[in-house]
């Protein structure tokens, strides 16, 4: 008797059957490209800890984005590097209608009306201490004050919506901010403005290079100022938890989030899967700066094959249930996908 009768390898033997039985696909429609913008003119700077990622001045922004527009990338996520003299303890610059973020948004809306603009809402690019909230002295010492922070985030969100941001993306992890932002947007006639909530955002060491990119604290270091000293663990989630992520997502959906985000990506694929299975809502994942740094560093050294490994990581996110991926590799990935046909 021939053994075995059932042979999974039969379906893998030719490219055409492999294509036919493929369960998941990655396309340019799945990609969100984050951009770092800086003040000044005629300048591009490298992010040292993210080889290949650049910050650009506004006069260079349209040319920088043009290839992404040509490739059909659906959305961009904007991150400003605020000059140190514009930072303060309250993150006041986040509500300035003429801040870097707002000027970038109106420029991009004018030049590329077909591309969606996602605005990160959090205070860390604007505070001199690098926290995502405002500090208050209270019975528990100097702490991040949740509700005072939410008030600033509401102003920041309105400011971004007025400048043309299509999707407000709060990445701060304060309690109740989605409901407060939704109510304020609706009251001002921005009922069409979407909210992508960073619902399950973990206190991760993988954000180190991002803080270098936007100048919010030194690479890998935790922002200071709290007593007892603590990094972002009093607001971002504990990497040990997973049920808690479902609770966070449920609350944000209840408060009006249109889409949710899990962050970081690769070490949290189980969270992506659980969120998608439980809620079935548009679910996104952020392949963060530290993940980028690891891959880009290894690719540059010839230790990993960039032609394959980038798309493999992104397909992994799709397989885990993500509808799309925010990734610093978006442009490269779109180019590779086009080359593959
Ligand atoms: C702002 C914010 C951070 C990131 C995105 N938005 C930093 C942080 O929370 O400390 C990190 C993104 C990345 O590492 O690529 N709150």
Image (cartoon, rainbow, N blue to C red):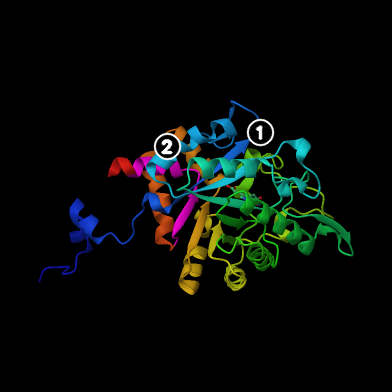
| Residue at mark 1: C-beta within 8 A of ligand 1 | no
Q: Residue at x 80, y 50 (%)?
A: 90
- Helix, strand or loop at mark 1: loop
Which residues, given as a range, are shown in magenta?
322-337
Left or right: 213 in relation to 3:
right
Left or right: 48 in relation to 73:
right
User: Around disc 2, counting alpha carbons within 10 Å, would you say few (fewer than 14), some (14 to 19), or many (20 or more)?
Assistant: some
Residue on which the image places disc 2: 67
Q: Position of residue 224 (x, y in %)?
A: 79, 48
The mark found on residue 150 in the picture is none
Residue 226 lies within the magenta run: no
* Number of marks: 2
User: Farthest left residue?
Assistant: 1
User: Around disc 1, counting alpha carbons within 10 Å, would you say few (fewer than 14), some (14 to 19), or many (20 or more)?
Assistant: some
Closer-to-camera residue (216/95): 95
Q: Residue at x 22, y 59 (%)?
A: 20
Q: Position of residue 76 (x, y in %)?
A: 51, 47
**Residue 246 appears in the rendering:** yes
Q: CA distance from mark 2 to mark 1?
A: 22 Å
Residue on which the image places disc 1: 39
Q: Does 262 sit above or below residue 165?
A: below
Q: Does 230 sit above or below residue 146?
A: above
Closer-to-camera residue (197/119): 119
Closer-to-camera residue (25/66): 66
Q: Position of residue 325 (x, y in %)?
A: 47, 53
Q: Does 300 sit above or below residue 153?
A: above
**Residue 228 appears in the rendering:** no
Quadrant the N terminus occupies: bottom left
- Helix, strand or loop at mark 2: helix
Q: Residue at x 54, y 35 (%)?
A: 61
Q: Residue at x 39, y 60 (%)?
A: 319
Q: Earlier in the sequence, mark 2 or mark 1?
A: 1
């Amino acid at each position: 008797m021939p053994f075995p009768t059932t042979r999974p390898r039969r379906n893998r033997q030719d490219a055409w059957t492999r294509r036919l039985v493929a369960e998941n696909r990655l396309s340019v429609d799945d990609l969100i490209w984050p951009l770092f913008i800086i003040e000044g003119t005629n300048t591009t700077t490298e992010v040292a800890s993210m080889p290949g990622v650049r910050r650009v001045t506004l006069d260079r922004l349209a040319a920088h984005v043009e290839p992404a527009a040509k490739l059909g990338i659906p959305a961009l996520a904007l991150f400003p590097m605020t000059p140190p003299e514009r930072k303060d303890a309250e993150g006041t610059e986040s509500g300035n209608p003429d801040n870097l973020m707002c000027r970038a948004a109106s420029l991009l809306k004018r030049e590329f009306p077909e591309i969606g603009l996602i605005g990160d809402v959090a205070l860390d690019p604007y505070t001199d201490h690098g926290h995502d909230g405002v500090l208050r002295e209270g019975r528990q010492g100097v702490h991040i004050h949740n509700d005072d922070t939410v008030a600033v985030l509401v102003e920041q969100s309105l400011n971004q919506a007025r400048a043309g941001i299509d999707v407000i993306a709060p990445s701060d992890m304060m309690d109740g901010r989605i409901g407060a932002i939704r109510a304020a947007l609706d009251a001002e006639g921005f009922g069409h403005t979407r909210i992508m909530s960073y619902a399950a955002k973990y206190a991760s060491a993988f954000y180190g290079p991002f803080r270098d990119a936007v100048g919010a604290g030194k690479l890998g270091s935790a922002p200071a100022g709290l007593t007892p000293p603590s990094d972002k663990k009093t607001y971002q989630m504990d990497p040990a938890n997973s049920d808690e992520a479902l609770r966070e997502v449920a609350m944000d959906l209840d408060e009006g989030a249109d889409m949710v985000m899990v962050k970081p990506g690769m070490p949290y694929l189980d969270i992506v899967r659980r969120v998608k299975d439980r809620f079935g809502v548009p679910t996104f994942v952020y392949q963060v700066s530290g993940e980028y740094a690891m891959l880009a560093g290894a690719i540059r050294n010839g230790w990993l094959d960039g032609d394959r490994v980038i798309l493999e990581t992104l397909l992994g996110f799709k397989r885990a249930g993500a509808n799309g991926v925010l990734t610093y590799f978006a442009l490269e990935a779109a180019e590779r996908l086009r080359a593959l046909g």
